[in-house]
Amino acid sequence: MQVAVVTETWPPEVNGVANTLARMVGGLHERGHDIRLIRPRQATDGPHGPDGAIGRDGFGEVLTRGMRIPRYPQLRLGVPARRLLSRLWSTRRPDIVHIATEGPLGWSALQAATRLRLPVATDFRTNFHAYSDHYGIGWLRNPIVSYLRTFHNRAGCTLVPTEALRRELESFGFQRVRVVSRGVDPLLFRPERRSDALRAAWGVAPEGLVVACVGRLAPEKNLATVELAFEAIRAARPDARLLLVGDGPLRAELQARHPDALFAGQRSGEDLAAHYASADLFLFASLTETYGNVTNEAMASGLPVVAFDYAAAAQLIRQDVCGALVPCGDRAAFVATAQGLACDADRRRRLGAAARTVSESLGWDTVVERFEQSLSTVIAESGLVPDDAALVARVPTV
């Protein structure tokens, strides 16, 4: 296939969308498909971007204009580029357009692809409607849902990572929703990455307790629940240390409240894997995820996870077999469960070992294959001939 991928975030930006999309696009490329990536120019890009031509390796890029996102200066939001994309896809027609994000660039890509009668698939990767309550704009929740429904229903399919999210979106009127889950690299994230030197640098004794949370330090991550849980843990285990890996607008506020916590900032690759494996317990309290890749990564690292019965945790964790689930939104249960697990080393080891076993079946190859099949199905269902020269000739190039 000739696949045009449109996204407003891409590595080296650090977030779940960028990381998982890069894995899936890289997997398609390895399976022999040609990829043309359309994304906003990042701060790390030079002044002269690529021309979009697909090279001998089957990969090409088009960089568009972008603007900084308030409170997240390291990220850029794409600006509309309908005319650019119409010209590009009229002369270099892809077999399918895959739109990973629903921002201005994604919307203009949807318009251009629709006008050119190109098959389109989309991802639903971020619960923007759920975020609204955490940013003082809860009154916009219904309009946001309406926009997202309109956006995704114009595509041949919308891909989501869990059955629960598929059911939720269908209850909102979303159509043609299909499930393609997420994977983890069990060779990168594994218990053997545990580092005594790193723990010593944290000032943690060999038998000390490190309670980790990985992700954006932002309101939508429900970090207040993590704070409460850690306070309860520390009441029972005064030697416990809180490790927060990630960055975001709440960092200064959290540092002021928890001067003894370990703030590791953003980490990646083997460094990130070592931070996971060098912890002893993982807390994940978010209720706004479409999936939550950190759950996979923590489990692969051999950590017992405490999470709400939601998103990836609900899909992967069997209660008291390979982790600890609590009812959604039950903060008291989350705190009590975290404290109980912190005080039971044998149970932590048992759940962590079982979590690692589960993760070994979550490699990316199967995920990429399902992604490939979904794109192929959208092309087949569209009934369009990719190289219809007469159709291309009728499409304006301005």
Image (cartoon, helix red, strand yellow):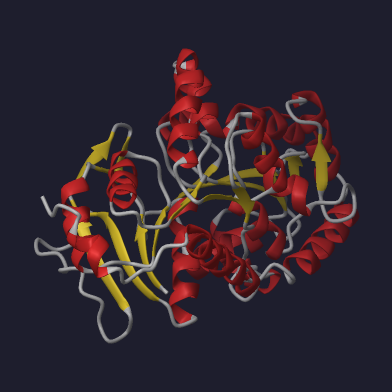
Quarter holding residue 199: bottom right
Query: What residue is at 51 percent from the left and 64 percent from the top?
Result: 375
Residue 219 in the image, given as x and y percentages of width and height: 50, 28
Taking 263 as reference, is 226 left or right?
A: right
Residue 119 in the image, given as x and y percentages of width and height: 42, 57
Residue 310 in the image, given as x and y percentages of width and height: 72, 39
For the N terminus, give its image quadrant. Answer: bottom left
Taking 396 as reference, is 250 left or right?
A: right
Residue occupying the far bottom of the picture: 56
Q: Nearer the viewer, residue 233 or 90?
A: 90
Q: Is residue 305 visible?
A: no
Query: What residue is at 28 percent from the left and 48 percent from the top?
Result: 115
Quarter holding residue 252: top left
Q: Nearer the viewer, residue 1 or 355?
A: 1
Total label count? Answer: 0
Residue 84 in the image, given as x and y percentages of width and height: 16, 53
Vertically, is 260 above or below 20?
Answer: above
Q: Nearer the viewer, residue 91 or 229?
A: 91
Q: Nearer the viewer, residue 88 or 320?
A: 88
Vertically, is 181 above or below 333?
Answer: below
Query: What residue is at 70 percent from the left and 38 percent from the top?
Result: 167
Residue occupying the far front of the picture: 390
Query: What residue is at 62 percent from the left and 47 percent from the top?
Result: 291
Q: Is residue 163 visible?
A: yes
